[in-house]
């Protein structure tokens, strides 16, 4: 019994002296770890990536691949988009010439980069993805795509949704990881109109009117461009000397009346020429007010359009067709109109030639349409052919005058090459729908031999930095 009491006493002494000593020996280790954690905090995860200060030089280089035709052009467009939003000038460079020592890159179409291919290989046709990749000091913004329309959607989404300015610094979120799919419904409306060449759209009192070659008219009262169109038949009274080529009617509202600028071949002159007809309502009938062709009687002239300059002077801009020029090259021409639009009050002047643009592959000047930008620049939409077929280009007046000096934009507004779509198309004009969205109207395809007829197609566009661009990214 005495020995048992001694054992219990010894055990108590161990709890009193030995175990507290063990805890005391461990305590400094714990307190040291906490001190280290306080003095060396874990690095905070980036929430934003700084691109540059507005208007200042950036560390980012925009890298594009050379595997497809779209990437270099896409890089140019993306650089323009970023510049327009932020005043930052991006250095664009092909991947093979990229400075590998730079830490900041925007990658687009770089098919030999692992970080690009990892994303691209997950995409199906018409899909895109945008992702920020941060690896230590290396920052990459990857824009991957499958198809040109997907690429356009990706660029617009990146610049509109993610490129922000905070306190003068241009940033993007550090955790972008989004994808999307191009929808043809967002990019264009293939109308339910039947075969109709050179479509012109007039919107009046919430009603859409469509006019096209053969002087056929249609009306859509649904309020929806995808809605049904009622045929109005021939909406013009055919002049006695008009025998064929009832082409490209445009209807413009002016001083309370409706004027049709159009073309026909005259049995008197043996030439095609432009005329002007008038009606007191959009449905017609439109009756000729010019006493025959208003354009020179010894020219083949087609596709007249209407423009009123800032001084209130009305003009007709029209095509001097290649079939009657001295060298077989089409011209664009213009002349001042009388206030009642019945005759020219100036001699026609030549504006430019069909072979002026770098992209031109034909002698044709077709489908002119005038547009003045908010900054005063004067643009003309017109059609010719590039390497892929019928297309829509943009010409601009250097001094904002109809009879000024005209230059040609290298970038087309519509081309099968540009879009990758199945059909070419052209003879463009601009109109606003009942919600105020601007549209480009074309017929597509151009000519027969396709699995659909020449169909009016409407593409949402907008004015941006003194030009017209597609507006296909819808939130």
Image (cartoon, rainbow, N blue to C red):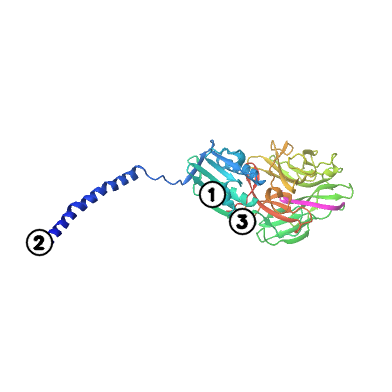
144 relative to 60, above or below: below
Gap between marks 2 and 3 measured at Cα = 88 Å
Residue 313 falls in image quadrant: top right
- Using the image as rendered, state which of residue 270 and residue 24 is in the foreground: 24
Q: Which residue is mark 1?
A: 131
Residue 259: say if magenta: no
- Using the image as rendered, state which of residue 1 and residue 315 is in the foreground: 1
- Across and down, in percent, residue 311 comes to 69, 39
Question: Does the rendering let one see residue 446?
Answer: yes
Q: Which residue occupies the extreme bottom position in the image? A: 1
Please count the marks in the image: 3
Gap between marks 3 and 1 measured at Cα = 17 Å
Q: Residues within 10 Å of mark 3 (few under 14, many from 20)?
A: few
The mark lying in front, picked from 2 and 3, is 2
- Report the span colored magenta: 241-257
Name the residue: 18% across, 52% down: 17
Q: First in sequence, mark 3 or 1: give its number.
A: 3
Gap between marks 2 and 1 measured at Cα = 79 Å
Q: Which residue is mark 2?
A: 2
Q: First in sequence, mark 2 or 3: give its number.
A: 2
- Across and down, in percent, residue 325 comes to 84, 41
Q: Which residue occupies the extreme left position in the image? A: 2
Q: Which residue is mark 3?
A: 124
The mark lying in front, picked from 2 and 1, is 2
Disc number placed over residue 360 in the picture, else none: none
Q: Is residue 52 left or right of residue 239?
A: left
Name the residue: 14% across, 59% down: 7
Name the residue: 49% across, 45% down: 135
235 relative to 76, above or below: below
Secondary structure at badge 2 equals: helix
């Amino acid at each position: 019994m005495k020995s048992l009491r001694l054992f219990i006493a010894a055990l108590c002494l161990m709890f009193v002296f030995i175990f507290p000593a063990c805890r005391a020996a461990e305590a400094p280790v714990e307190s040291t770890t906490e001190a280290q954690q306080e003095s060396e905090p874990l690095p905070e995860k980036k929430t934003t990536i700084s691109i540059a200060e507005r208007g200042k030089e950036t560390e980012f280089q925009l890298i594009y691949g050379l595997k497809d035709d779209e990437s270099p052009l896409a890089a140019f467009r993306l650089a323009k988009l970023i510049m327009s939003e932020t005043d930052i000038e991006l250095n664009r460079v092909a991947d093979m010439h990229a400075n590998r020592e730079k830490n900041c890159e925007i990658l687009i179409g770089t098919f030999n980069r692992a970080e690009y291919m990892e994303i691209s290989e997950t995409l199906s046709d018409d899909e895109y993805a945008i992702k920020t990749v941060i690896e230590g000091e290396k920052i990459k913004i990857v824009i991957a795509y499958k198809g040109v329309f997907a690429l356009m959607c990706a660029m617009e989404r990146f610049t509109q949704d993610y490129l922000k300015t905070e306190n003068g610094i241009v940033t993007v979120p550090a955790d972008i990881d989004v994808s999307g799919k191009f929808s043809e419904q967002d990019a264009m409306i293939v109308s339910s109109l039947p075969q109709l060449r050179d479509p012109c759209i007039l919107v009046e009192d919430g009603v859409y009117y469509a006019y096209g070659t053969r002087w056929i008219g249609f009306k859509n009262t649904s309020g929806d461009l995808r809605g049904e169109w009622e045929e109005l038949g021939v909406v013009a009274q055919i002049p006695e000397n008009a025998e064929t080529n009832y082409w490209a009617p445009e209807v413009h509202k002016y001083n309370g009346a409706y004027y049709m600028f159009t073309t026909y071949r005259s049995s008197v002159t043996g030439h095609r020429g432009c005329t002007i007809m008038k009606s007191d309502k959009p449905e017609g009938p439109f009756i000729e007010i010019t006493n025959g062709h208003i354009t020179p009687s010894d020219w083949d002239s087609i596709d007249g359009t209407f423009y009123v300059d800032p001084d209130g002077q009305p003009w007709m801009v029209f095509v001097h067709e290649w079939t009657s020029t001295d060298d077989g090259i089409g011209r664009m021409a213009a002349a001042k109109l009388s206030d009642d639009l019945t005759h020219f009050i100036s001699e026609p002047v030549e504006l430019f030639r069909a072979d002026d643009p770098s992209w031109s592959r034909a002698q044709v000047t077709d489908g002119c349409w005038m547009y003045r930008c908010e900054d005063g620049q004067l643009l003309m939409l017109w059609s010719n052919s590039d390497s892929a077929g019928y297309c829509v280009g943009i010409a601009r007046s250097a001094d904002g005058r109809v009879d000024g000096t005209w230059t040609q934009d290298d970038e087309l507004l519509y081309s099968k090459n540009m879009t990758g779509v199945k059909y070419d198309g052209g003879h463009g004009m601009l109109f606003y729908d009942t919600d105020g969205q601007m549209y480009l109207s074309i017929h597509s395809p151009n000519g027969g031999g396709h699995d659909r007829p020449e169909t009016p197609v409407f593409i949402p566009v907008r004015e941006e930095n003194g030009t017209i661009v597609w507006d296909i990214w819808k939130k």
